[in-house]
Image: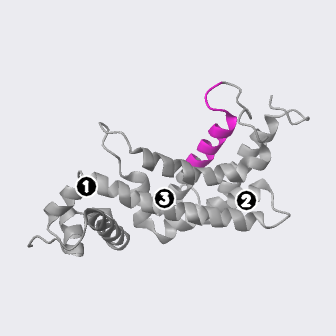
Amino acid sequence: MARRKDHSRDEIREMAIQAASRILEDDGPEALTARRVAKAIGYAPGTLYNVFADLDELAIFVNGRALDDLRQALMLARQQAAENDRATTVDVVMALARTQLDFMRQRPNVWWQLFHVRWPDDQLLPEWYIQKIAQTMGELEQALLPEFDNDDSDGDDDGDGGFRDRLVRTLWAGFFGICEVAALRQLMIVPTDDIEDMTKFMVEACIAKAKAQKRPDGVPI
């Protein structure tokens, strides 16, 4: 393919990310090749390597867009659930769990790429990407805030980041595991109908632990 100079470097970057995202969505991670992306945007494959260090870097940008989409869905679910005056923390967190399950079921290729493709072990994840992960997980933290005081010391009983941080990470990992169970039907360890019950059991147990961390006067133990 002949070289072109129709677009700026930033424009080519954006075109490539959008094309790669479409390819991933439609045909899966195995279809995400430099040649396929380059063809989709009308440039030679070598052009991509003038914009991205390698295909791994392009994949990280694609995952960044997926994280943006997931965060938006989680934010909307949290806000809608919280509009109900009778909604408990369990109700709001369950709305987030259902949203992650829906995301996985509706966009399985994107989910697989987001949570299974590994960044090379000898390279650090970009700071902007780490921030996106933190912001996405932050929607879960926002849902849990009613169980904690407003200061950052809630449950910080062992100096390793605090109980609240561990609770968020535990629930996030639990949601991921439940999504995996739902996705890999041939390896199901529970009936599909039990997925929500299993999720609610986990959420209720974690939030009960959060409540138990405080004395009756609301001060962390």
Asked if residue 13 can be seen in this view, the reply is yes
Looking at the rendered structure, which numbered label has been put on residue 131?
Answer: none
First in residue order: circle 2 vs circle 1: 1
Query: x, y percentage for residue 88?
Result: 80, 57
Measure how far apart labels 2 and 1 are at the Cα level.
Answer: 39 Å
Q: Which residue is mark 2?
A: 92
Which class describes the residues within 10 Å of circle 3: few (<14), some (14-19), or many (20+)?
many
Query: x, y percentage for residue 185?
Result: 48, 63
- Residue 190: say if magenta: no
User: Which label lies toward us, 2 or 3?
Assistant: 3
Measure how far apart labels 2 and 3 are at the Cα level.
Answer: 20 Å
Q: Which residue is mark 1?
A: 52
Residue toward you, 200 or 152: 152
Secondary element at image label 1: loop
Asked if residue 98 can be seen in this view, the reply is no
Residue toward you, 102 or 20: 20
Query: x, y percentage for residue 59?
Result: 33, 57
Q: Amino acid at mark 1?
A: Phe
Q: Is residue 29 rendered to the left or right of residue 95?
A: left
| Part of the protein shown in magenta | 159-173
Q: Amino acid at mark 3?
A: Leu
First in residue order: circle 3 vs circle 1: 1
For the point 35% across and 47% down, the residue is 118
Q: Which residue is mark 3?
A: 67
Query: Up-down: is 14 above or below 189?
Result: below
Secondary element at image label 2: helix
Quadrant placement of the N terminus: bottom left
Query: Up-down: is 14 above or below 198?
Result: below
